[in-house]
Image: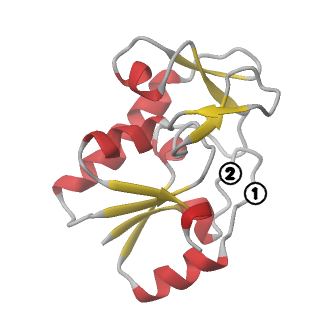
Amino acid sequence: MILVSSCLCGEKCKYNGGDNKNEAVMTLCEREPHIKVCPEVLGGLSTPRVPAEIIGGSAQDVLQGNAKIYTKTGMDVTAAFLKGAEKVVSLLEHYPIEKAILKAKSPSCGKGKIYDGHFKGCLIEGNGVTAQALMNKGIKVITEEELI
């Protein structure tokens, strides 16, 4: 079973109220059992919402309480991101999840590259909080960009 970012399946849960529908992901979901998740919505954030980025460290630092996630307007949304990650990770106790296909560059779901915390569109090496939490549990995480 796979976890999939809801926005990749066409659900309108993206920060701006849109989606990130991806045909390759949709095709895969037609063939494989899957669970759709949006960690930010699970954490209690609304759609639409102000964009957020990790500031002051990595996703692992956020998980350890040593970095924060702020919106572009300066609101601390760390607790919501952690709550969403916790809810996604809790699914591992109930479902035989082996892999996750998550949204690239997201502060929740990104793997390998995320935005740098300055809200200028610059990417740095790093992972989103939920992606990191899943990897910490041994789940293979890829992004839609790796489905070629």
Label 1 residue SS: loop
Disc number placed over residue 81 in the picture, else none: none
Q: Nearer the viewer, residue 127 or 9?
A: 127
Q: Residue furthest right?
A: 120
Would you say 73 lies left or right of 9 here?
right
Q: Nearer the viewer, residue 125 or 127?
A: 125
Task: Say what amino acid the circle numbered 2 marks.
Answer: Lys
Quadrant of the frame with the N terminus:
bottom left
Residue at 53% in and 43% down? 112
Q: Which residue lies under the disc numbered 1?
A: 18
| Color theme of the render | secondary structure
Residue at 45% in and 23% down? 79
Residue at 47% in and 58% down? 142
Quadrant of the frame with the C terminus:
bottom right
Q: Which residue lies under the disc numbered 2?
A: 14
| Category of crowding for the residue at label 2, using alpha-carbon neighbours closer than 10 angstroms: few (below 14), some (14–19), many (at least 20) | many
Q: Nearer the viewer, residue 101 or 88?
A: 101
Residue 143 falls in which quadrant of the image?
bottom right
Would you say 18 lies left or right of 54 here?
right
Task: Say what amino acid the circle numbered 1 marks.
Answer: Gly
| Category of crowding for the residue at label 1, using alpha-carbon neighbours closer than 10 angstroms: few (below 14), some (14–19), many (at least 20) | some
